[in-house]
Image (spheres, helix red, strand yellow):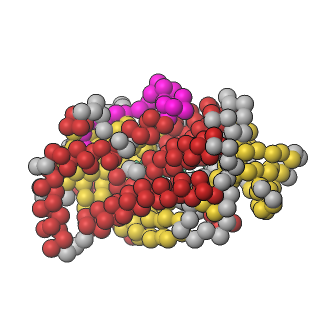
Amino acid sequence: MTDQQTDIFILGAGMVGSAAALSFAREGFTVSLIEANELPQWSESEYNLRVCAISAASERLLKNLGVWQEILARRVSPYEHMHVWDGRVSLDFDAADSGQAYLGHIVENNLINTCLIMQCQSQSNIRLLMPSRLSAMTWVDNCVQIKLDSGDEIRSSLVIAADGGNSQLRCLSRIKSDHHDYQQTGIVARVRTGLSHQNTAWQHFLVGGPLALLPLSDGSCSIVWSADSMRAKELLLLDDAAFSEQLANAFEHRLGSIEVLSPRAGFPLVLANARRYVKDRIILLGDAAHRVHPLAGQGVNLGFGDVAELSSTLLESVGHGRDIADPLYLRRYARRRRAEVSLMLAGMDGIQRIFTSRRRLVQKSRRFAMKMIDHAPPIKRFLVDRALGN
Ligand SMILES: Cc1cc2nc3c(=O)[nH]c(=O)nc-3n(C[C@H](O)[C@H](O)[C@H](O)COP(=O)(O)OP(=O)(O)OC[C@H]3O[C@@H](n4cnc5c(N)ncnc54)[C@H](O)[C@@H]3O)c2cc1C
């Protein structure tokens, strides 16, 4: 049992929490990083079911944190094109149109997490406790006192909630979150297609929700099929052959036959935005602060955006001789992030609603807009730049 003082306490060593720990530690702060689960295990012989489309902005952060080279050396899949269609009208995005070599990289979640945690372990000013849980938290003068289930006590100037969508810290801090359940499940699996994926991220907007096929480096694809929860339940219960057939039909056989190579998993899809990102000495990051529909693959990219912005805010505040939890600086951080996150959440929610609408007028307007965008290179460049985080 120990009693320690730290600059920053982080609950949750997922992709966002471990990136935050590394970023703060590299700025010279002492960090305690607490994770409820065991170390993530990335394996070369098996693909992780969960993958992310990593934007250029997130890639820059991971480079600055010294982990991108390690990720590249293990396994990533750059994609150069995106093909989106709704049955009648399609829209194409090309990296070359924006003068880029690629639109992003598909990377397994546990690979990003493993590389970040390995780097955290090599940092002398990060104390990593896993598996470990928070059992109590009290506010005292100029710091927060935390008790862990191991009996350890930690006093910290700043407390970061990076403990995901069902954040325990957000609840303990009594921060409310606006929440919308899409009544959809995102089914993920790895599949092999009859035809080459052409380094393209494919997305078919079905009335029940979008179906994405994301290219992987061995020629297979990772799917994210967002379907009404009832339909998803049925799809998850099908045997592999029947599921593959349903999938190929839903994908309109654009890449020929489809064969499922992995088990399937389903994740409930919600839109959520905490009413406050900062309260006293508590800051919410990543999914603890906001959750977005996966249709444009922006969730963890927003979380990494939080990390980059908070790191520069803390550096600025301490550089000006202020307290690490100076409310003026933290409020400025929260304002900046809210503007960026709200725009993304509203944009993704709008797209999701427009594409799942059964109203003919909405469908006609959508197809008209898609045609317009497809013939307007400057709008496409703008959209690509936004998605890349440029
Ligand atoms: C189907 C699907 C597809 C997606 N695709 C993309 C994509 O292409 N691109 C993209 O950017 N995003 C995508 N996302 C979103 C992305 O997965 C999340 O935004 C991201 O995982 C959030 O990371 P996080 O670290 O904030 O939270 P989490 O990944 O939830 O990590 C939280 C961590 O905290 C730990 N924890 C939780 N509670 C406690 C506790 N009480 N004490 C200690 N530790 C705790 C957990 O064990 C976990 O390690 C997708 C999401 C879904 C559902």
Q: Residue 167 placed where, x, y %?
A: 61, 61
**x and y percent of residue 203 in the render?**
27, 51
Q: In this view, does 80 lie above or below 131?
A: above
- Label tally: 0
Quarter of the image for residue 166 reads bottom right
Nearer to the camera, 378 or 211: 378
Q: In which quarter of the image is residue 352?
A: bottom left
Question: The magenta stretch spans which residues?
Answer: 62-83
In the rendered view, tell whether residue 358 sits above or below residue 21.
below
* Front residue of 259 and 195: 195
Task: Give the quadrant of the C terminus.
Answer: top left
Quick one: 390 or 152, which is closer to the camera?
390
Name of the residue lying farthest toward the right = 1
Residue at the farthest front position: 320
How far across and how far down the image is residue 291, in percent? 47, 59
Is residue 118 rendered to the left or right of residue 85?
right
Question: Going 30% across and 68% down the picture, which residue do you hit?
Answer: 353
Image height check: is 274 above or below 388? below
Q: Which residue is drawn at 83% across and 45% down?
A: 4
Is residue 67 covered in magenta?
Answer: yes
Q: Is residue 337 in view?
A: yes
Query: Residue at the spot x=51%, y=37% of the render?
Result: 112
In the rendered image, residue 11, in percent from the top left (x then y), is placed at 67, 51
Q: Which residue is drawn at 19% across and 54% down?
A: 85
> Is residue 265 at all visible to an observer of this figure?
no
Is 161 situated left or right of 74 in this image?
right
Answer whether residue 100 is magenta in the image: no
- Does 228 sit left or right of 119 as displayed? left
